[in-house]
Amino acid sequence: MKTIELFNQEVLVKDSLCGPTPESRWEVEPNLRLYIKVTDSCNADCKFCANGNCKDFGKLDLEHLDFVIRYLKENNRLHSIGLTGGEPMINPDKLNDILNLIWSIDKNIQVQISTNGLNLREIAGFDDPNNLESIHISRHHYDDKKNIEIFGTDTIATTEDIMFLQDALTNKKIININTLVMKDYISNLEEIKKMLDYVGETGVYKNGFVSLMKCNDYSESHFINFNDIFNNLDENFLLAHRFYAATYCECIDGIYSSKNAKLVEFYARMVKECKCPYTTQLVYTSDNKVTAGFGGKVLYKGINR
């Protein structure tokens, strides 16, 4: 860990790469992912959600955001940008404006969008969707009815929406499907394989699996340790890497051969503690603050116009 100065305040950050054992440590000069909370509103009602308020606290100001991105770049602290919420696709036009702002500063900034699939097809009409590093679509079950049950709404990505966007994009590696591993749903190896087979059928190349963070009662009761599944892979899987961030987080990645003979990349991640002593990310909030992680110390306080 290393203390750096940002916005005239001290911040404790991670200064090493993840390694093949919890004890591995390769020191690097820290730079951080900036998450931009486009809004705190959300169309879904997920029981595991850590952002339970689901309402806007202000109006995101592009002028303040411009300052923050340029400041982080000039100080060599910006690794990449993630656009999130709430649900960032509640206002597709606003999201497109934010993307244009980012790429007016630097066309090479890596940007990802995380969405439950609301208004998903609108991304195809953005000014430069193929410049995105990735689009992470939350899809927690291969069965549409089960997926709707998990989200508590049907205003999410359908299979047809995912296939439409995949077909519309020139860069076929942009879309990732993100799936929570939890009791009663995707909870064992056979269900993992069904999910990967589903993703292969959509034409998407990558599926991520994430254990719930045990930060509320629902997540505690539905938690599944991803090692109980991914330590027992069969011949359809090729495991490539395993990484640890000390004792706080671990992940794996590899390739799966689906039943329709398509190769699907997969990864799995488990955060072991809700609270970590250091930060690997900054958050630009919907009311124009910058915090050290989600819900962390306020480093910059813009004007809520």
Image: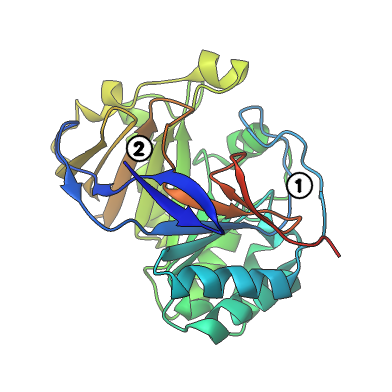
Query: Relative to residue 294, is residue 16 drawn left or right?
Result: left
**Residue furthest right in the image:** 305
In this view, 74 is above or below 137:
below
**Rendering coords of residue 92 (x, y %):** 72, 69
Q: In the image, what residue occupies the spot 25% across and 30% down?
A: 230
Residue 80 image-quadrant placement: bottom left
**Residue 49: % across, % down:** 64, 33
Mark 1–mark 2 Cα distance, whole angstroms, equals 26 Å
Task: Identify which amino acid the numbered label 1 is placed on.
Answer: Asn
Could you tell me which residue is drawn at 62 percent across and 39 percent down? 295
Q: Image check: 268 left or right of 154?
A: left
Query: In this figure, which residue is indicated by the disc labeled 2?
Result: 269
Quadrant (top left/top right/bottom left/bottom right) for the C terminus = bottom right
Three-letter amino acid code at disc 2? Answer: Arg
Mark nearer the N terminus (1 vs 2) = 1
Res 70 quadrant in image: bottom right
Give the secondary structure at mark 2: strand
Q: Which residue position is annotated with label 1?
A: 43
Which part of the image, by quadrant, shows the N terminus?
A: top left
Q: Nearer the viewer, mark 1 or mark 2?
A: 2
Question: Would you say 34 lies left or right of 156 here?
Answer: left
Question: Who's the residue at 41% across and 64% down the image?
Answer: 77
Per the rendering, the mark at residue 51 is none
Give the vertical position of 200 relative to 50 (above or below): below
Residue 144 location (% of width, % of height):
59, 42
Q: In this view of the protein, which residue sits in the foreground, 305 or 139?
A: 305
Asked whether residue 122 appears in the rendered view, the answer is: no
Few, some or many residues within 10 Å of mark 1 (<14, 14–19, 20+):
some
Q: Nearer the viewer, residue 245 or 211?
A: 245
